[in-house]
Image: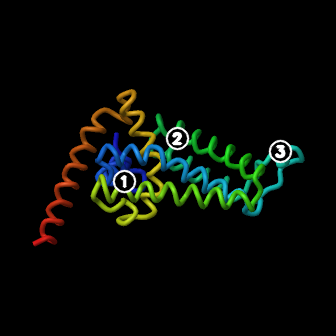
Amino acid sequence: MGRTGLFDLERHFAFYGACHSNPVNILIHTFFVWPLFFTAAVLLHFTPSLYNFPSGISEHGLELNFGFVFTLMYAVFYVCLDKKAGPLAALLCFLCWVGASFLAGGLGFSRSWKVVLAAQLFCWTGQFIGHGIFEKRAPALSDNFVQALLMGPYFVLLELLQSAFGYEPYPGFHASVQKQIEADIKEWKAKNQKKLR
């Protein structure tokens, strides 16, 4: 069943879902959130190595650096959030890290940061357009920056699993979350109407 505190998946999902209820905005996030994670891992590839692998492994681009720590933090958090879909999210995180490491190793720092900058600007711009034009609500970042950054990739995965397979972390999860999302949106609309008066 549900948890409390940092690992309260219902609360996290409802918080993120209330700011992402428009189908077009959700679609934009579906395509633009994971590339942000991937490109962050590309840039973090160039941080100092925390451990030197035996020769051969490092030559292929894999380093235990801050990119690995960043990936590990996300992966552990997702596994703790949900024992069923969490390992899938963790696997996607590590696949991003491996892919980002190989890409960064092949491009080198000079070209990598340009690719990262372009991708980050494109993806963030797309998401802000999604919020401004379609959602007509500020991004979740404006309410809780860290929670939004942590939950973005997982929210996208959970939405896809739910849409494609009817996945729920536990029975009644989506019904409970939907009630919270509807209540949050209703409260947000009421606040906005007061501001317009």
Q: Position of residue 123 (x, y in %)?
A: 50, 54
Q: Residue at x 31, y 56 (%)?
A: 133
- In the image, which disc is placed on residue 57? 3
Q: What residue is drawn where x is 66% and y is 54%?
A: 42
Q: Nearer the viewer, mark 2 or mark 1?
A: 1
Count residues near mark 2 (Cα–Cα under 10 Å), then give few for <14, some for 14-19, many for 20+. Answer: many
Residues under numbered marks 2 and 3 in contact, where contact means CB atoms less than 8 Å apart: no
In this view, the residue in front, 131 or 15, is 131
Please, what secondary structure does the residue beneath circle 1 have? helix
Q: Residue at x 67, y 61 (%)?
A: 113
- Name of the residue lying farthest toward the left: 197
What is the three-letter code of the residue carrying label 1? Gly
**Helix, strand or loop under label 3:** loop
Farthest-out residue, right: 55
Query: Please, what secondary structure does the residue beneath circle 2 have?
Result: helix
Q: Quadrant of the N terminus?
A: top left
Mark 2 and mark 3: span between their CA atoms?
A: 24 Å
> Label 3 vs label 1: CA separation?
41 Å
Residue type of the residue flagged with mark 2: Ala
Residue 84 drawn above or below residue 128: above
What's the residue type where badge 3 is placed? Ile
**Camera-side residue: 196 or 8?**
196
First in residue order: circle 3 vs circle 1? 3
Q: Which mark is residue 112?
A: none
Q: Position of residue 9 (x, y in %)?
A: 38, 47
- Classed neighbour count for the residue bearing mark 3: other residues with Cα under 10 Å, few (<14), some (14–19), many (≥20): few
Q: Earlier in the sequence, mark 2 or mark 3?
A: 3
The colour scheme of the drawn protein is: rainbow
Question: Residue tagged by mark 1?
Answer: 130
**Residue drawn at (77%, 59%) of the image:** 49
Q: Which mark is residue 89?
A: 2
